[in-house]
Image (tube, helix red, strand yellow):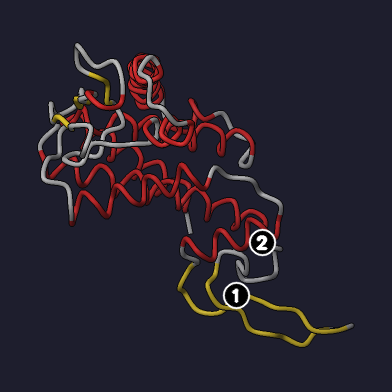
Amino acid sequence: MDLVTNAVSSIQLGLEDYETGTEPRLVSSVRNLYAGILLLYKEALLRLSPADSEEVLVKKFARPVRQAGGIKFVGNGKQTVGPTEIRERFNGLGIHVDWEALDRIARRRNELEHYYTTVRQASLTDLIADAFVLVRDFVQDQLDEDPRGLLGESTWQAMLAISVVHERERQECVDRLRAIDWGSAVLVTGIERFSCSDCGSDLLWPTAGSSDYGDATLQCRACGNSLTAQE
């Protein structure tokens, strides 16, 4: 079961889909990146499974087996763990992951398939940035490998460049949002987590002339969609 090779292939394919830029390939990009991250998580469970346990930690089901001195559990069947089981096992093993970032990718995958009316390359830069950080930290901290070497130089540099550009644009948006008088600390926190209703991008900033909550209009830098204060 060569999970790590499949994980890297999924991530590389996800980036290729993103760079192609057509709507079907962009949707495919999200699916592949999410699948690649889950495969990396399964690889960690596989490596932690005892040698004689039939890959018990990565298998969805386990069965008890008698042995000298007691009973042990071994993997049962071919079905592997899903996101819920991965989270449960990581929590039990003390493996820390940014679940909020992974959940954002999962939500975007579902929303792109069922909700959003616009899928553009620029609207997925935040997702690539999340994926880059998740992959980099996990490969380095949990798999004890060099993420650049594992992903390959071209994939690493491409994801890094997208992440850096997005973080720069995101910070500019946040700075402009914080310059508006929202009249409430709750609104300030909420507006910084807001995303475009058309494409899902978090690159929203106030248009010229917006100075307080009552007259603020936000525009998405990814797809150009505008949101009034009431919206």
- Left/right placement of residue 19 relative to residue 74 reads left
User: Quick one: which residue is furthest to the right in this view?
Assistant: 69
Query: For the point 39% across and 47% down, which residue is it?
Result: 36
Label 2 CA crowd tier, 10 Å (few <14, some 14–19, many 20+): some
The image quarter in which residue 125 lies: top left
> On the image, numbered disc 1 is attached to which residue?
75
Residue 52, image x and y in percent? 70, 69
Label 1 CA crowd tier, 10 Å (few <14, some 14–19, many 20+): many
Q: Is residue 157 at least partly visible in the picture?
A: no
- Left/right placement of residue 24 relative to residue 185 reads left
> On the image, numbered disc 2 is attached to which residue?
49
- Residue placed most toward the observer, 30 or 51: 30
26 over 148 or under it: above or below: below
Name the mark on residue 218. none
- Residue placed most toward the observer, 105 or 16: 105
The image quarter in which residue 226 lies: top left
Label total for image = 2
Q: Quadrant of the C terminus?
A: top left
- Residue placed most toward the observer, 188 or 131: 188
183 over 116 or under it: above or below: above
Upstream in the sequence, badge 2 or badge 1? 2
Residue type pointed to by label 2: Ser
Q: Is residue 98 at least partly visible in the picture?
A: yes
Q: Secondary structure at mark 1?
A: strand
Q: Secondary structure at mark 2?
A: loop
Residue 114, image x and y in percent? 18, 57
Residue type pointed to by label 1: Gly
Query: For the point 18% across and 53% down, which residue is it?
Result: 115
Q: Are marks 2 and 1 in contact (CB under 8 Å)?
A: yes
